[in-house]
Image (cartoon, grey):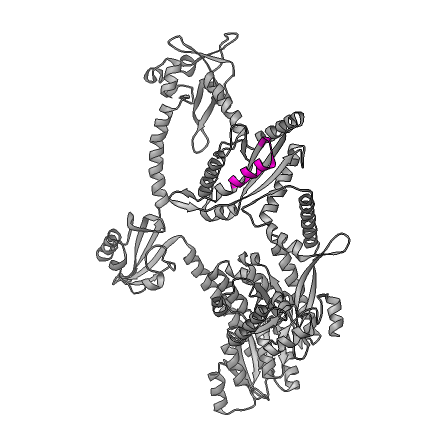
Amino acid sequence: MLFSHHENSHNKVLVVDDEPTSLMIMAESLSDLGEIVCCDNGTQAIEKAVFFQPDVILLDIEMPGMNGFEVCKKLKNNPKTAQSHVIFVTSHNEQIFEYQSFASGGIDLIHKPVDLNICRLRVQNQLKLKHQEAQILAAKNDISTLVAQVPVYISYWSNTEENLFSNDETSHWFSKSSEQMLGCFAKDVLPDELYEAFHRCLTKGIEQEVLNIQLPSPRNKIEYVRAQINLRIKEREVVGVILTLSDITSITHTKKLLSNESERLRVMLNSIGDAVIATDNNAIINFMNPIAERLTGWHVEEAKGRHIEEVMKLVDATSNKTLVNPISVALKEQRIVAMALNSQLTGLDGRVYRVEDSAAPIRDIEGNIIGGIIVFHDVSESIAMAVKMSHLANHDLLTDLPNRVLLHDRVTHACKVAMSMKKKVALMLIDIDHFKYLNDTLGHHQGDLIIKHVAKRLESLIDLNTTLARIGGDEFVILLPDVQSTSAIDAIASDIINTMNEPFRIDSQEYILSVSVGVSVNPADSTQAEEMMTHADAAMYRAKEQGRNRFCYYSDDLEYQFKQRQSVEKLLRHAIEQDKIEVFYQPKLALLTEKIIGVEALVRLRDDENKLISPLDFIPLAEETGLIHALGQSVLKQSCKAAKEWADKGHNIKVAVNIAAKQFTDGNFCNLVADTIEQAGLASELLELEVTESALMHDFEEIKMMLNKLSDLGLAIAIDDFGTGYSSLSYLKLFPVDVLKIDQSFVRDMLTDTQSMDIVRTITSLAHILNLQIVAEGIEEKQHLNSLIDLGCELGQGYYFHKPMPKEEFDKLLG
C-alpha cells in the first residue's frame, strides 16, 4: 500500500502494525507528509526498511513472530537503516515499555488509541529533525571537504604550543598526518626556522607575521613555503595560534628561472646567428646584438639614440630603390610586418647583405606599444632554413626518419620500378607490442627515448638501399625495394624480432620489448602503395592475434578476416547505438531436483541477415575497441529488468551477468551497477556478477576494493571458468567470493579423462571447505549429472537441461 504527496515527496515514512484498521488510519492521516509504505509484520518491515530507507518508522511493539523491540534492534544494527527515526506505538502505559522503547533505539513513544493530530505533529517534528540533520551533515561535509581540498596547510595550536587541528590528512606537508599531529608540540614537528617565528609571535604577542622559509626536508616536492602566523586573542589573552602554509616552491623556482632566463636571453641574443635590433615606439634604437652590429657596421653604443632608418639602410636589390624599414611599418600599423624578400642591407663599412625576416611591435602587459623589434639574417641562412624546413616536412621530428609522406613517395616509386624491372618489393609494418601501456606508465618522455632507441636498432639492420620510416606513435615501416626471395624477407623479419627481444637500457633501467611485424609483397598481394600499407597493417594485426612477437605475411584469407572484423565492429557499434543488443538466458538448476533457481545472461549479436554472430567474434573486438563498457552496461540493464519482471510474477530467479576484465578498469563501475539495480527496482540478492580469474589479476588492491563495494550492495560474486586461469587460493580467501563455476571443459571430459575428474572433485571439495556455492557448466549427458551429484555439486547448467534462449522463450518455460 503506497500513499504520496507531491509537496513532501522527498519524505519517507514506514508504518508497521499488525492491525489492518490501525495501519489504514495512520497511513491515511500521514499521507500528505510524504511517501508512506505500510506492512503488517516485523520481517517484512526489515525488508522494506532496507529497500525503502525511510526517514521515520512508526513501529507497533506487539506483533506476532517478531515484536517491535527486536525489529528496532535489527534496524539499528544495519548501516542502511540505522539512521531512521523509530517511533514506537503501543497500548501499554507501563514504564518498562517506555524504558525498553528508548533502550532499543527508539526516539519517541505514542500510546494507543492513537491521537492522530499528535501523531502527525510528532512525525512532522521527526521529519524536520531528519531534514535538519541532513543539512547539518551536508554543511559539515562541505566544510570538511573544502578544508581538506584547499592546497594550503591549515593548523590550530593552543597557547601552550600543542596541536589541536590540522587539515593534512594524507601527510602531504609533514611526516605526520592530521590524526598523528594531534597533541604534538610545535617544537617537535615544525622546522627550526618556522618554530622560532611561531614561538616569537606567541611569547612577544605579535598578532601576525608572514615569512618565507625553505623546508630542510622537503616532502612531495614542497621546498619553499610562505608561512602566516596569526594569534587568536580573546579578552586580551592569547588563546591559540593559527598557522597556515602555502606552497611557493613553483613561485620561488619561477623567480629563479626568470632571473636565469633574463640572463640566458641576453646571452642568447648576443650569441644567436640572427641580427636583432630593438627600438622605442618612435623607432629610436635602444638595443643591438653583435650580429646586428656586424651586419650594419654600427657599434651598439654609437647606434643607440639613432633612428632605425639611419642605421639600417634597406634598398630593393634590383631597383636600388630605398625601402621603408619594416619596424617603422610595424609601429605605425601595430602589426607584424615581414621584410621584403628582395631586401638589401648596406652596412656602414660598405658591405652589402641580402636580408630577410620580420619586425613586430612590443607591447606591455596592458597591450600598449612600447617599442619594436626586428630580427633579420642574410640569404645564405634563409636558404639553409628553407632546406631544413623541407627536410622537416618529410621526416619524423623525434627520430629524423622519413615520415609517412616521404615513405609514400618511395613506395610508389619502388612499385613503378619493380613493375618495369620485374622485381619484387616488400613492405614491413613494425608495431611495438603494448607500447601504449609503457608510454602511459613511464610517461611520454621515457616513451620518446624508447622510440629513439628502437629506431637506432632498426637502422642497424638495414642497408643504404632500404628505407626505414616512422609513420605513427609506435609504428615503423621498412621498405625493401629489391627482394630476391621470400627467404631474404624471412631473414630480415626474424632479425627484427630477435633484435627487439634484446633488452634496451635507458637511464640505467632495462626494458624488454617485442614487436609484431606484418609483411606485404608487391606484386604478389598488391600493386599500389596504398594497398601495400593496408595489407601490411592487416598482416601485422594477424601477428598480434597469434600472440605477438612474430611476423606474418598478408593473404587472401587475411583480407577476408580484416573486412569481416570491420563489418562486425560496424554491426556492434550500430547495435549498441540503436539499443539492439540481445540477451539470451541459460537456466541454472538445482541438480538434485532439477528445479530452475537462476539463469546466466549471455549477450547475442545479429548480422544484417538476422543470423547470430558468435560471441567469440565480437566480444574480444569489443574489448579491444573499448565498446565493452557500453556492451556490458546494456546486458546488465536488460538482465536486471528481466529479473525484476520475474520477481514480480513470483519467480525469484537470480540472474548471473558476465563482467569483462576491462570493465574493472572503469573507476565508476560500482556506481554504475548500483544505479542499474536501483533503476530496475531489483532486490540486489537476485543479481550475481561473474568475473574471470584473469580479471582478478589486474591490480590486487584495486580489485579487492571494487569487489568489496559490489559485495556491500548485496549481490553475489562468482568466479567464472574456475581452474582455467591463475587459480590462486589467496583471492578466494581475501576477495568476497560467493560462487565458483567449474569450467565446461573439465565437466565435458570428466567421464573420459581422470585428470578432469580429479579437477572437478578438487574444486567441489574446495568450494565446500570454503563454504562457497559450486556451479558446473557444460552438463550435456545424464552421466555428467549423476557424477556431479555424487561429487556433491549442487548447481549446474548445460545443454542436457536447456540451451540459452531469448527472454520470451524463458518466460514460457517458467509458465
Which residue of the protein is positioned furthest toward the right in this rendering? 609
Quadrant position of residue 374:
top left
Is 385 situated above or below 440? above
Q: Position of residue 317 (x, y in %)?
A: 50, 10
Can the viewer see residue 317 in this picture?
yes
Q: Is residue 595 left or right of residue 660?
A: right
- Name the dominant secondary structure of the magenta segment: helix
Quadrant in the picture for the C terminus: bottom right
Number of marks = 0
Q: Quadrant of the N terminus?
A: bottom right
- In the rendered image, the vertical position of residue 51 relative to residue 224, given as above or below: below
Is residue 491 highlighted in magenta? Answer: yes
Q: Is residue 9 visible?
A: no
Viewer-side residue, 607 vs 521: 521
Q: Residue sitting at 62 percent across and 77 percent down? A: 789
In reply to whether residue 296 is colored magenta, the answer given is: no
Please provide percent x and percent y for residue 701.
Answer: 46, 61
Decide which of 234, 375 is in the foreground and name it: 375
Residue span colored magenta: 480-496
Q: Name the residue nearer the viewer: 676 or 771.
A: 771
Q: Position of residue 120 (x, y in %)?
A: 58, 78
Position of residue 343 measured from the top left corner of the image (x, y, whole percent): 49, 14
Q: Is residue 776 above or below residue 305?
A: below
Along the line of sight, the residue nearer the viewer: 66 or 59: 66
